[in-house]
C-alpha cells in the first residue's frame, strides 16, 4: 500500500480511520489540497477476544505519513468514543483542538490523568462559531445527545459543503432548553450540501427517540415512592440525567452524595462550568450522608455497566468500603447495557436483589432513553439537509446498511449513497463521489503503558494460555555429544491439577525421553529441531489423552 496521492484540484477526500463498521474510536479526516482536518479522536473498549487489553485506538499511520498537513482536530462532543484517543494522539501529532466548553473540560481532565497539559492551542467554541483553518471553514451547530454541549459540523470548502451530524437526536424538550439547530440545518440545506455524514447507531430502530425529560418524570415517580435510601447509577457524562435526578431529590427532601471517581470528576467539572445547577446545600459528603435518615438521602454512583471495579458493583458484592446495601434501599440503573456488558449488569442486579434492595433496570420501564436518533429522526435530518451525496457513519456495518436504505427511501439517488469501512478513501468532486482507495486502518491495542506493542501474535498466545494453559519442558543436553544428560522436567500452569495428574505427567516425561533418545546421534545438533520434536511428541500425546492443547514451551539446557 503506497502513499496515497493527495486529491487533485477540485477534489475532496473523506477518510474515516475509525467509527465505520463499529461503534467506537471515531476519527476521520477531510482532505483538500494541502490541508487535512480531523473530526473527533476517540477510543474503543476491547472486545471479549482481546484478553488483557485496556483500550483500542485507531491506526493513524496515514496521518503520521502526512503529519505536516494535519491542521486541526474538531471535536463534536465529550464521549470517550470521540475524545478518548486524544492523549495518545497528541504524543505523536500536535495540532490545535476545537470543541465546546464541556467537551474541552472533559479532555482536560483526561490529559491531567496522562500528565500532559492541554495543548496550548485548544480553543473553546460556542455552537454557531465558525473556525477557519487552511482551505476549510468549520461551523459548529447544536444537536441533542446524551451529553450536554454536543455539536455537529458544517465544513465549507472549495468543492462543496459537508455536514457531519456528530452523535445526535432531536429532542424538542431538552433538559437545558437548547434544542438542536433545525434552522441552521434547513438553511444550509437550502444553500446546497454536497455530502452528509450522519450517525447510524439507531438506524435499525423505527420511530423517534423519546425526550430525555420523559426519563426525568419516571425517575421522579420512583424517587417519590421510595421509603428508604435511593441509589441511582448512570453514565458520568449523562449530565442532564444527573441534573434531573438531583432536582427530584431536592423536591423530595433528599440530600445527594456522589460515589465513584469518574462521576465525582464529571459532576465537579460540569458544576464548575455551569452545566449542572443546584440549590446550595444539596450536596453532602458520603460520610455525612450515611449519618442521615435513609429516606433523606440519595446516592449517585458509577457502575451502570456492571464494571467489576465500579462503586455499584462493589456495593452489590458487599465489597464497598462505606456503602452497605440493605433491605429498604431502592437502586435505579438508569442506562442500558452496552452490548457485551449484559451479563455483568445482570450479575449486579442479582446481587442487589440478594441483599434485599428493590432494583429498577432494563430498557422498557422508562428510566433510560438513547442519545441517538431513530429512523424518523434520521429521515428528518436527511430531508432538512438534502445532501447530494450521503455516507452513513458511526455504526456497525448493519447500521450503515440500514441507514443507507433510509436515505434511498427519502429519495436520495441510490448511486449517491456510499457505504465504506475504516480506511476507505471517498473522493468527491462537485458532481461525483466514489471510493478511490484504502489507507491503513487497523486497531492499535493499548495494554498498560504499551501502545501498539501487543499485536495478533501476542493475542493468539494469550488466548491459547487462557484456554488450555502452559507446559514447560526442561531438557538437559550434552553440548558436544548431543546426548540427553538428565530426565526431562515438566512444569505446568493452568493445564491440569498437578497433584492429581502425576501418572499423566510421568508418562509425558517418558514420552519426551524416548523420543529424544531415539533421535540421539541423529539430527539433534539443531536446537530448533529438538524443540519441534518435543512439541510434536507431547502435543500429540496430550491431545490423545486429554483433548486439550496447552502451549508447550521446550527449554534446552546445555550442560
Ligand atoms: Zn456520543
Ligand atoms: Zn459516539
Image (cartoon, helix red, strand yellow):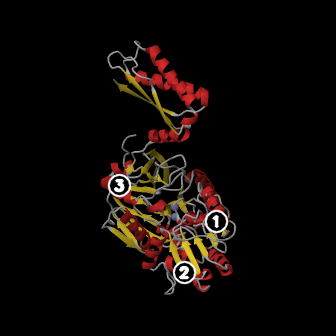
Q: Position of residue 293 (x, y in %)?
A: 60, 82
Q: Does the beta carbon of the residue at mark 2 sit less than 8 Å from ligand 1? A: no
Circle 2 is placed at which residue position?
291
Circle 3 is placed at which residue position?
33
Label 2 neighbour load within 10 Å: few <14, some 14-19, many 20+? few
Quadrant of res 554: top left
Q: Nearer the viewer, mark 3 or mark 2?
A: 2
- In the structure shown, which secondary structural element does the residue marked by tag 1 occupy? helix
Viewer-nearest residue: 531 or 17? 531
Circle 1 is placed at which residue position?
352
Q: Is residue 228 above or below residue 195?
A: below
**Residue 165, can we see it?**
no
Q: Position of residue 559 (x, y in %)?
A: 33, 23
Q: Is residue 374 above or below residue 231?
A: above
- In the structure shown, which secondary structural element does the residue marked by tag 3 occupy? loop
Label 3 neighbour load within 10 Å: few <14, some 14-19, many 20+? some
- In the structure shown, which secondary structural element does the residue marked by tag 2 occupy? loop
Q: Nearer the viewer, mark 2 or mark 1?
A: 2
Say whether disc 2 or disc 1 marks the residue closer to the N-terminus.
2
Q: Position of residue 288 (x, y in %)?
A: 51, 80
Q: Residue at x 36, y 67 (%)?
A: 132
Of the 4 image quadrants, the one containing the N terminus is top left
Q: Is residue 269 above or below residue 65?
A: below
Say whether disc 3 or disc 2 marks the residue closer to the N-terminus.
3
Amino acid at each position: 500500500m503506497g502513499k496515497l496521492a493527495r486529491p487533485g484540484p477540485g477534489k475532496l477526500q473523506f477518510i474515516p480511520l475509525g467509527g465505520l463498521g463499529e461503534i467506537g474510536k471515531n476519527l476521520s479526516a477531510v482532505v483538500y489540497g494541502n490541508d487535512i482536518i480531523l473530526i473527533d479522536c476517540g477510543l474503543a473498549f476491547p472486545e471479549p477476544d482481546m484478553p488483557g487489553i485496556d483500550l483500542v485506538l485507531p491506526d493513524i499511520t496515514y496521518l503520521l505519513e502526512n503529519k505536516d498537513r494535519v491542521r486541526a482536530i474538531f471535536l463534536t462532543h465529550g464521549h470517550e468514543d470521540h475524545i478518548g484517543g486524544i492523549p495518545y494522539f497528541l504524543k505523536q501529532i500536535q495540532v490545535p483542538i476545537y470543541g465546546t466548553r464541556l467537551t474541552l473540560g472533559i479532555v482536560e481532565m483526561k490529559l491531567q490523568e496522562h500528565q500532559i497539559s492541554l495543548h496550548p492551542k485548544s480553543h473553546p467554541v460556542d455552537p454557531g462559531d465558525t473556525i477557519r483553518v487552511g482551505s476549510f471553514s468549520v461551523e459548529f451547530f447544536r444537536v441533542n445527545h446524551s451529553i450536554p454541549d454536543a455539536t455537529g459540523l458544517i465544513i465549507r470548502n472549495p468543492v462543496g459543503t459537508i455536514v457531519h451530524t456528530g452523535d445526535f437526536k432531536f429532542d424538542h424538550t431538552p433538559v437545558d432548553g437548547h434544542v438542536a439547530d433545525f434552522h441552521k440545518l434547513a438553511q444550509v440545506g437550502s444553500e446546497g450540501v454536497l455530502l452528509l455524514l450522519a450517525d447510524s447507531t439507531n438506524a435499525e430502530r423505527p420511530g423517534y427517540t423519546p425526550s430525555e425529560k420523559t426519563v426525568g418524570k419516571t425517575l421522579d415517580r420512583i424517587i417519590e415512592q421510595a421509603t428508604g435510601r435511593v441509589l441511582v447509577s448512570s453514565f458520568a457524562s449523562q449530565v442532564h440525567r444527573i441534573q434531573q435526578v438531583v432536582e427530584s431529590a431536592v423536591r423530595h427532601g433528599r440530600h445527594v452524595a456522589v460515589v465513584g471517581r469518574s462521576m465525582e470528576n464529571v459532576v465537579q467539572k460540569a458544576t464548575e462550568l455551569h452545566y449542572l445547577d443546584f440549590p446550595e446545600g444539596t450536596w453532602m459528603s458520603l460520610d455525612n450522608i450515611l449519618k442521615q435518615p435513609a429516606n433523606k438521602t440519595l446516592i449517585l454512583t458509577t457502575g451502570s455497566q456492571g464494571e467489576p471495579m465500579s462503586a455499584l458493583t462493589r456495593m452489590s458484592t458487599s465489597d464497598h468500603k462505606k456503602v452497605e446495601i440493605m433491605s429498604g434501599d431502592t437502586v435505579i440503573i438508569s442506562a442500558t447495557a452496552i452490548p457485551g456488558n449484559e451479563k455483568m449488569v445482570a450479575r449486579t442486579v442479582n446481587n442487589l436483589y440478594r441483599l434485599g434492595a428493590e432494583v429498577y433496570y432494563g430498557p422498557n420501564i422508562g428510566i433510560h432513553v438513547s442519545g441517538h436518533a431513530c429512523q424518523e429522526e434520521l429521515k428528518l435530518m436527511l430531508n432538512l439537509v438534502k445532501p447530494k451525496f450521503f455516507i452513513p457513519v458511526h455504526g456497525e456495518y448493519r447500521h450503515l446498511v440500514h441507514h443507507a436504505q433510509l436515505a434511498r427511501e427519502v429519495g436520495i439517488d441510490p448511486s449517491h449513497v456510499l457505504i465504506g469501512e475504516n480506511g476507505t478513501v471517498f473522493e468527491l468532486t462537485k458532481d461525483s463521489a466514489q471510493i478511490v482507495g484504502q489507507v491503513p486502518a487497523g486497531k492499535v491495542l493499548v495494554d498498560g503503558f504499551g501502545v501498539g506493542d501487543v499485536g495478533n501474535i501476542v493475542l493468539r498466545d494469550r488466548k491459547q494460555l487462557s484456554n488450555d494453559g502452559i507446559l514447560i519442558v526442561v531438557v538437559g543436553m550434552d553440548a558436544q555429544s548431543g546426548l540427553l544428560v538428565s530426565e526431562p522436567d515438566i512444569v505446568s500452569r493452568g493445564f491440569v491439577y498437578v497433584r492429581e495428574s502425576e501418572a499423566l505427567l510421568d508418562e509425558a516425561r517418558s514420552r519426551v525421553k524416548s523420543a529424544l533418545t531415539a533421535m540421539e546421534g541423529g539430527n539433534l545438533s539443531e536446537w530448533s529441531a529438538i524443540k519441534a520434536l518435543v512439541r510434536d511428541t507431547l502435543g500429540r500425546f496430550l491431545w490423545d489423552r486429554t483433548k486439550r492443547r496447552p502451549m508447550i514451551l521446550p527449554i534446552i539446557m546445555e550442560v
